[in-house]
Image: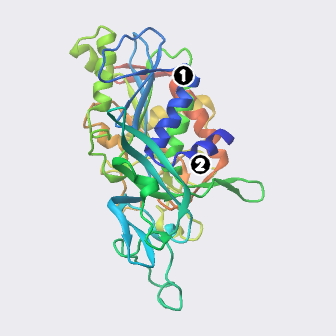
C-alpha cells in the first residue's frame, strides 16, 4: 500500500505517471523499446514502449499463444494552463486556465494545487521534454458566503473568470516557464493520499481514477511469470478528453504494438487476426459506488459498494464492453482464484460514462470486458476507495494474467 500511495502522490500528471511507471518496470527488468527503431524480441523478454510522454505499453513476450491485455489511463481531470498563462492586474497574478476533462470543479476550490506537467526547452541544440512539478502550491479561492449568498444552494463557477491565484503583485511565471519553447502544464490537486475510518479502511487521494488501474496492472505484469500468452499493460493518455489524440486509445498505438509483436512471432496478417480473436482485453477503470447519502441515483439491483470486491461493468448501449460471454469468463476466473466481485449498471434513465474498452475495439476486435473498483466522488479533487478492494484487484489481475483461456467454437475453457 505504501508503494501505491507514493505512486499516487508523485504522479501529478500523465507525464509523471509514465516516468514513475518506467522506473517501476526498469526495476523489474523490463527494457525500453522505441517506435522509431526495429524491435528484436526474445522469448520471455520483458519490454515497454512509450508514446508522447503520457502513454505506455508494457508486455512480457511469448512467441506463441494469444494476447492478454489490461488497459487503463494515466490522466485525470484538472485545469490546463493556456499559453501566456500569467494574467496580472496589478494586485494579483492569476493563472489563465481551461478545464481538462469533466472535473467536479467545486472540489478544486480552497485546496493546494501544484503546477505540473512537462516543459519543452532547448538543451545542447535539441528540444527536450521533461516532466515538471512546482515546489510551491497555488490556490483557487472561493468567494465568501457573505458575498455569494447562493453558494450553498447554487454553485456554478465560471471557468474563464474564476482562476487559480498564483501570487501577489505582478510576478510572472518566469521560474516555471522561463527558457521553455512550449509546455503542457496543469494546476493539479496536491493533497497527499490519506486513510479514513477507525481502522483505516478507506483510501482517499487525488487521481484514484485511473492511477489505480495503471499501478496495479503494471505491478501484476511484473509478477506474471510463466504466462503462455503475451501479457500486456496498456496505459493511455487523453481518456478524460475523449482519447482522440496521437497517443490516446483511439490512436493506432495498441494496434501497432500488436502488429509488431505478431511480426516478431512470424505471423502473417491472417494469423495475427486469429490470435487477436483468441485474446482477451480488460478495460480497467473505476465504477461509481453506492453513495450512502444518495442511494436514489443508483440502479436498484446493481449497486457496488466499497469493500465488495472487483466490479464487472455492463451497459446495453455499449459504453462498457462486457457482454454475457466475457462476463462469464471473468466470473469463472475470479471464482477460481477466490476473488470477490460485484456488478455495476447505470440507472436506465441516466447517461452512462464510457471507458477505454469501447474505443480500443474500434482498433482491434478482441473480446473484452470492463472492470474497476467501487469508488466514491469520481472526478473530485479527492476520491475514495476501500483498501480491501485494492487487494482484491491485485489478486484479480494476477489471476487474469496467469490463467489459460482456450476458445473452440462455442466452448471456452479456462484453467488456472
Colour convention: rainbow
Q: Which residue was labeled with disc 1?
A: 402
Task: Give the alpha-carbon distance from disc 2 to disc 1, as whole Å.
Answer: 30 Å
**Coordinates of residue 268 in the picture (x, y in percent):** 23, 11
User: In the depicted view, which residue is nearer to us: 257 or 367?
Assistant: 257
How crowded pointer 2 is (Cα within 10 Å; few <14, some 14-19, many 20+) is rated as some
**Coordinates of residue 90 in the picture (x, y in percent):** 41, 78
Residue sitting at x 44%, y 52%: 76
Q: Is residue 415 left or right of residue 100?
A: right
Q: Is residue 204 visible?
A: yes
The local secondary structure at tag 1 comes to helix
How crowded pointer 1 is (Cα within 10 Å; few <14, some 14-19, many 20+) is rated as many
**Coordinates of residue 241 in the picture (x, y in percent):** 33, 53
Q: Nearer the viewer, mark 2 or mark 1?
A: 2
Q: Is residue 148 left or right of residue 265?
A: right
Q: Residue furthest right?
A: 198
Residue sitting at x 39%, y 37%: 55
Q: Residue furthest left?
A: 269
Quarter of the image with the N terminus in it: top right
> Which quadrant of the figure has residue 360?
top left
Looking at the image, is mark 2 or mark 1 earlier in the sequence?
A: 2
Residue sitting at x 49%, y 42%: 16
The answer to whether 184 is drawn above or below residue 332 in the figure is: below
Q: Which residue was labeled with disc 2?
A: 9
User: In the depicted view, which residue is nearer to us: 331 or 211?
Assistant: 211
Amino acid at each position: 500500500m505504501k508503494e501505491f500511495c507514493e505512486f499516487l502522490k508523485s504522479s501529478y500528471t500523465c507525464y509523471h505517471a509514465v516516468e514513475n511507471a518506467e522506473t517501476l518496470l526498469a526495476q523489474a527488468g523490463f527494457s525500453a523499446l522505441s517506435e522509431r527503431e526495429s524491435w528484436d524480441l526474445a522469448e520471455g523478454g520483458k519490454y515497454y514502449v512509450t508514446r508522447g510522454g503520457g502513454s505506455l505499453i508494457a508486455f512480457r513476450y511469448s512467441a506463441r499463444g494469444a494476447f492478454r491485455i489490461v488497459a487503463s489511463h494515466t490522466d485525470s481531470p484538472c485545469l490546463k494552463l493556456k499559453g501566456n498563462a500569467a494574467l496580472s492586474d496589478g494586485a494579483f497574478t492569476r493563472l489563465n486556465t481551461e478545464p481538462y476533462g469533466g472535473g467536479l470543479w467545486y472540489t478544486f476550490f480552497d485546496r493546494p494545487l501544484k503546477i505540473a506537467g512537462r516543459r519543452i526547452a532547448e538543451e545542447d541544440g535539441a528540444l527536450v521534454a521533461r516532466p515538471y512539478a512546482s515546489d510551491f502550491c497555488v490556490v483557487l479561492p472561493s468567494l465568501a458566503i457573505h458575498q455569494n449568498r447562493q453558494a450553498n444552494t447554487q454553485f456554478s463557477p465560471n471557468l474563464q473568470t474564476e482562476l487559480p491565484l498564483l501570487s501577489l503583485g505582478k510576478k510572472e511565471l518566469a521560474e516555471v516557464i522561463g527558457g521553455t519553447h512550449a509546455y503542457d502544464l496543469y494546476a493539479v490537486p496536491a493533497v497527499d493520499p490519506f486513510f479514513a475510518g477507525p481502522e483505516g479502511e478507506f483510501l482517499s487521494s487525488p487521481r484514484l481514477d485511473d492511477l489505480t488501474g495503471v499501478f496495479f496492472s503494471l505491478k501484476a505484469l511484473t509478477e506474471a511469470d510463466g504466462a503462455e500468452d503475451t501479457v500486456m499493460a496498456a496505459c493511455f493518455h487523453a481518456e478524460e478528453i475523449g482519447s482522440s489524440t496521437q497517443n490516446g486509445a483511439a490512436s493506432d498505438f495498441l494496434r501497432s504494438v500488436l502488429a509488431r509483436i505478431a511480426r516478431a512471432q512470424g505471423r502473417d496478417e491472417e494469423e495475427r487476426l486469429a490470435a487477436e480473436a483468441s485474446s482477451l482485453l480488460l478495460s480497467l477503470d473505476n465504477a461509481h459506488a453506492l453513495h450512502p447519502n444518495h442511494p436514489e441515483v443508483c440502479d436498484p439491483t446493481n449497486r457496488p459498494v466499497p469493500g465488495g470486491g472487483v466490479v464487472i461493468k455492463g451497459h446495453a448501449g455499449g459504453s462498457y464492453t462486457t457482454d454475457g460471454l466475457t462476463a462469464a469468463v471473468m466470473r469463472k476466473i475470479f471464482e477460481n482464484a477466490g476473488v470477490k466481485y460485484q456488478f455495476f449498471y447505470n440507472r436506465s434513465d441516466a447517461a452512462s460514462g464510457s471507458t477505454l474498452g469501447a474505443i480500443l475495439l474500434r482498433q482491434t476486435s478482441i473480446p473484452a470486458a470492463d472492470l474497476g473498483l467501487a469508488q466514491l466522488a469520481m472526478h473530485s479533487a479527492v476520491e475514495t476507495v476501500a483498501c480491501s478492494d485494492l487487494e482484491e484487484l491485485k489478486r484479480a489481475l494476477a489471476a487474469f494474467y496467469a490463467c489459460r483461456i482456450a476458445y473452440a467454437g462455442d466452448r471456452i475453457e479456462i484453467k488456472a
